[in-house]
Image (tube, rainbow, N blue to C red):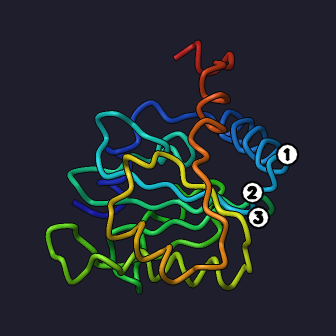
Amino acid sequence: MTENTVFKERIRFPIPTRELARRWSLVREAMQAQGIDLLVMQNDNKFLGGYVRYFIDIPAEHAYPVTVLFPVDDEMTTIFHSSAQNPAPPAWSARGIKTRQGAPYLRTLHYTNHYDAEEIVKVIKGRKDKKVGIIGMGLINAALYQYLHEHLPHVDWVDASDLVDEIKAVKSEDELAR
């Protein structure tokens, strides 16, 4: 199976791009109102969908974490379990994603626990973000959370789950049709 085949099989009932754009716009408006520079989310399974699928329309699968960084003023950065030379998802599926990063991290290999966190730190430092929201605290592992706090002590960390959940609760015509 090719990489394209695998991803095409993973994107079932694709969300229309107009619906993704609607979501992104509403979330950015809410972020601006609360002074949040960036949102961090992660998911590692497809069964409950999670915030990752809501933002990029690609589910995480089989305990392979997917991290999404959603800035208030730019397109997203994703970090998938993949190689740095050939990052997932494929470019054709990366709607709203500016930077695709790959890191060979697995939660069962403890020495890789910080691979995703290191990439997140680089992005936040490079952007000079001051207030960062985490979405779905229960979906982010302790090693990631601890690393971010230790390496970004100047950042004001907030739980932004309610910010997104309030938007997710009101269904659009596209969502109702599905």
Labelled pair 1, 2 in contact (Cβ < 8 Å): no
First in sequence, mark 1 or 3: give its number. 1
Q: As shown in the figure, which amino acid type bears the numbered disc 3? A: Asp
Q: As shown in the figure, which amino acid type bears the numbered disc 1? A: Ala
The residue sitting at the left extreme is: 108
The residue indicated by pointer 2 is: 36
Mark 2: few/some/many CA within 10 Å (<14, 14-19, 20+): many
Q: CA distance from mark 1 to mark 2?
A: 8 Å
* Left or right of 5 in this view: 77: right
x, y percentage for residue 170?
66, 19
* Left or right of 56 in this view: 107: left
Q: CA distance from mark 2 to mark 3?
A: 13 Å
Q: As shown in the figure, which amino acid type bears the numbered disc 2? A: Ile
Mark 1: few/some/many CA within 10 Å (<14, 14-19, 20+): few
The residue indicated by pointer 3 is: 74
x, y percentage for residue 72?
77, 58
Between residues 147 and 96, which one lies in front from this camera angle? 147
Question: Quick one: SS at disc 3?
Answer: loop
Question: Quick one: SS at disc 1?
Answer: helix
Number of numbered discs overlaid on the protein picture: 3
Q: Nearer the viewer, mark 1 or mark 3?
A: 1
x, y percentage for residue 142?
33, 63
The residue indicated by pointer 1 is: 33
